[in-house]
Amino acid sequence: MSNLVIPSSRFSRFKRLQIGATVFLALANGVPANAMEQETVTALELAELLRAARSVIASNQPLINDLNKGPKGLTSQKVLEDTYATFRKKMGTDPLRFSAETKRGKLIQAQISSIKEVIDKQQETINQKGVGFKGFVPAVFARLVNEQFRVKMRGVADIKITAPYELVRNRKALPDKWEGKFLNGVMRSKNRPKGKNLKEISNVGGTKAFRILVPEYYSKVCLSCHGGPKGKIDVTGYPKEGAKLGDLGGAISITLFMKE
Amino acid sequence: MNPTIRKYLFALCFVFSTCLLGVSVFLVQALSTGVKAVEQETRFFNALDQANEARSVFYNLRYWLTELSVSLLMQSERNADAAYLRFDKSIKSLPGVDSATISTIRTKTNLMVKIAKRAVESYSKDQRVLGNSSMAQTRVHAALVEAEFHKLVSSLKQQAVLARNQTIQGASRAEYLAYIVVALFSIIGFVFTIYLIRSITTPLSHIQDSIREMTAGNLDTKLPESLLGEIGDMTSALRLLRDAELGRLKVDEANRAKSTFLAVMSHELRTPLNAIIGFSYLLLNGGAAFQTADKVQEYVGDIHNSGEHLLSVIDDVLDTVKVESGTMQISETLVLLEKISK
């Protein structure tokens, strides 16, 4: 999935409802409402930063797939600059505004480092001449960034893009029990407002953690691989899901471990 | 039993029908045996085909498991699961294979799948070393299954080839026996036909010879003896015809004898009558020279003797007629032989 639609605005009515729900959940789990609110904002910023970087890859897809061009100039520096710009445009803030000493700053920095390392590592692939489609698509990029982030932030935080079981392509993206329960249940409800997050204080591997699922919907770009006709083989060699514009495609699942 | 030509012909038809039936029964039996052998052979080849199909599906399953471990794509997992179901179905429905072999292949394959899935789980969790270790075990189990398949396919192939050879041998034997049976029945039919034809034509030829002889006037020709049936009837008829001809000849001879008798008899009757007429004329018209007492006495005596003689002749003729007509009555009386001899 690439170039996904940003589901919510900071100042929307829906956002206020989300914050209200967060306060309620925090109280119910014995977590201060303020802390719950902070975790939510951190998680949403991480999700937004990931989406911004992914959209940069999506907009550069024709360049990456250029058969005849060798070095493409799509360096980690270029990707990060465009990512910051996209983030700022969407969120109205600078992702680098927090100190690396703070938890939020540390998480954002880790994600930025992950983006940089993935792009650096994939330079040979990106710049390969004579090969058109290289398999380096936004979804793969996002997964690689998340895997890198997981290594860096093990025990602190985890980011994963997952989906309802039948929409998952790579086993690594399979939902766990908690994710599956919501992705195959309430999140697919027709009455559920679009973009509404789902969060919960939960126990992950014996550790209390803040978990949030940020829904993602198929955009026009996504449908070139995930659209119709259902079963037709797409450019990656995978049968298309037959999705329609705006259908629930998955969710960014973020876990922030809450140390006692 | 009274052998007739019709019965001979029925017997001939019966013998030929029996031969034909015998040959047909033999050929049908040979064909039936051949069909059964071909069916058996087909069963083995079908089993071989299905074993090869199961083997092919097993390779397909291995491919998708390997593909899954590399790509971790859900579609590959679904393909692997579908391949497993196809494999399980095909291996379970293998005809003519003992359950122990099927059970071994299934158990080893299930173990291989289980370990391959464990490897995939490890790869999904970025546990590459663990995944590689599991994949190594998968290869070992795949090799064991492959060895079982090799053994199974070789055995089925051997049985199929054996069945085919038996079919070919059976067909050759049936062909050889068919030649013998057909030749035997042909000889029996030929010999019997010759015998029947001869048994009809030989007496017919004899009868024909007899007819020619008789037509040429030789009624003494020898007719065939003791022939039964239609030819016997013909011989009997010919015999009757000959006897009739002989009878006719005898009647002709009798008629000729009668004519002779009548001619003689006429002379015998005329002689005394002439004497009577002559002497009586002399007595009436001879004049005085012939009307003397002595002459009259003599002539009347001659007339009387001639009358007695004529009566005796007529009595003899009448007796002969009585004898011929069968009305002669014999009266038993005492007769003096002395008187008759005079």
Image (spheres, rainbow, N blue to C red):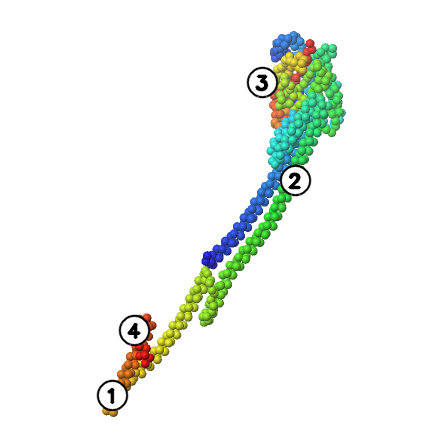
Picture disc at residue B296: 1
Chain of the residue where label 4 is placed in the rendered structure: B
Please report the residue visible at 65 percent of the width from the left and 31 percent of the height from the top.
Answer: B105
Mark 4 or 2, nearer chain start: 2
Q: Which residue is mark 2?
A: B158
Q: Nearer the viewer, mark 3 or mark 4?
A: 4
| Mark 3 → mark 2, Cα distance in angstroms | 62 Å
Q: Amino acid at mark 3?
A: Ser
Q: What crowding class fits label 3: few (fewer than 14 Cα within 10 Å), some (14-19), or many (20 or more)? A: few
Q: Dot 3 corresponds to which residue?
A: A189
Q: Nearer the viewer, residue A178 or B248?
A: B248
Residue name at image x 36 percent, y 78 percent: B260
Residue pushed farthest bottom?
Answer: B289
The part of the image, by quadrant, that contains residue B190 is bottom right
Secondary element at image label 2:
helix
Residue at x 63% of width, y 14% of height: A199
Question: Could you tell me which secondary element the residue under label 3 belongs to?
Answer: loop
